[in-house]
Amino acid sequence: MDFQELYQQKLITPAQAVKLVKSGDWVDYGWCTNHPVALDKALAARKDELTDVKVRGGVTMWMPEICKAEDAGEHFTWNAWHMSGIDRQIAAKGMGYFIPMRYSELPRFYRECVSVDVAMLQVTPMDTHGNFSYALAASHLQAMLAKAKHVILEVNENLPWVNGLTGSEINIRDVDYVVEGENPPVAQLGAGGAPSEVDIAVANLIMPEIPDGACLQLGIGGMPNLVGSMIAQSDLKDLGVHTEMYVDAFVDIARAGKINGSKKTLDRGRQVYAFAAGTEKLYEYIDRNPDVMAAPVEYTNDVRMLAQLDNFISINNAIDLDLFGQVNAESAGIRHISGTGGQLDFVMGAYLSNGGKSFICMSSTVTGKDGTVKSRILPTLTPGAIVTDSRTTVQYLVTEYGIVNMKGASTWERAERIISIAHPDFREELIASAEKMHIWRKSNKR
């Protein structure tokens, strides 16, 4: 088969391609750095011709053109699998909504639960075998494109080619149209500002818990990334990577000679992940790098797979938690911030791993816009807050005041341990609340 000839037959302009979209359709934009650019602009240009077009995306890194107009919500509805700051802005416009999920289930959702009329996303240029790489996000894209009635690829020469399992590429034979855009730079995700004293204190408590030969998962956020930076400067060795999101910290650890994957019980020698986002340093590192491997999220996040990885270490953030050990990592009351993502998958998988450990870390307090300092450890979660990790799944909880293990602890033991890592200014108040809820013993330390 002449793949180049087939490519030319399917090559059209973005304006021509988006004519496939009709009012009432479900349109998928892919995931994170794969969201379309030229096709998004072309679809936005058709705004006044369309109504009730429902678009899905996730971990959005720039404002879609279809969401920019003042009356955009009269024509398009945005649905996010995982909320970023951009997704929250879209929701604030009254046209954006969240789709609850455990990230590992997403491919199955496409196979069994949702419909896709048109899928459009960015990919790498085609290789000599007619394949396009999904680049930074294997994620759920194979299942999404298999379900789509129409598939449109937008080629971006700047996307890195990532080696991966089945489900990391698509062939020109399985595509309706190809468009060539403006080859915009790949969207970058910074590591944030300098770590605070609290971040450093939390990271220092986690570091002694990580053994040589550990397999690492780092969640999104400053604290997990700081732990990664500390690992890069540590004496740890023979580390492996099996993670949902690949971030800059893994590049630092690998370049410091700490990662070789020699102790991994699955995919020995490979750093495995579902999607990646970071700086140009990361994109250059993973481009055609045989040491890294993209894989569908139903593989990377499957609890049954994680349980087979010895000494699996999972490090994630939280927004707040209560005295029962329930963790909220995705909302401020009813205001949605992020999503469950893979956190629950990794909390459970790490605990099931031989020698594995799961850490939920956060600062003990937060300062509001009015300057008021509030405890992030609460008697009960704020009404409307989402329970990301149930009390029965949580293992280690960490603040700057300590690290405690919830496994095997009764309700009064949980309350005592959790209060011990709360800010001292709030402990008496929390003890009084625990007494009212009958989860505090008079003999407990005060």
Image: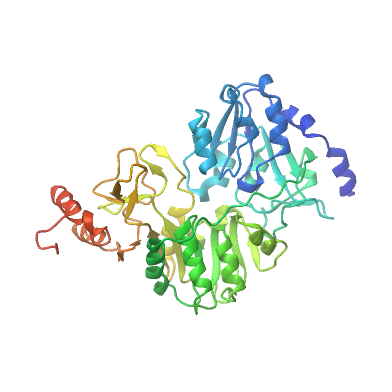
The residue closer to the viewer here, 339 or 167, is: 339
Query: What count of labels does the image hold?
Result: 0
- The furthest residue to the left: 442
Q: Is residue 321 above or below residue 164?
A: above
Can residue 150 be seen by looking at this rendering? Answer: no
Q: Quadrant of the C terminus?
A: bottom left
> Taking 197 as reference, is 160 left or right?
right
Point 50% across, 61% down: residue: 225
Q: Is residue 377 above or below residue 49?
A: below
Point 66% across, 24% down: residue: 47
Point 57% across, 65% down: residue: 250
Q: Position of residue 143 (x, y in %)?
A: 63, 45
The residue closer to the viewer here, 356 or 266, is: 356
> Taking 307 as reference, is 146 left or right?
right
Q: Position of residue 347 (x, y in %)?
A: 42, 58
Q: Position of residue 370 (x, y in %)?
A: 33, 42
The residue closer to the viewer here, 110 or 136, is: 136
Q: Position of residue 44 (x, y in %)?
A: 68, 29
> Taking 132 as reference, is 106 left or right?
left
Question: Would you identify the image quadrant in which residue 202 lies?
Answer: bottom left
Question: Would you identify the image quadrant in which residue 23 lies?
Answer: top right
- The furthest residue to the front: 371
Can residue 179 be seen by looking at this rendering? Answer: yes
Question: Would you identify the image quadrant in which residue 416 lies?
Answer: bottom left
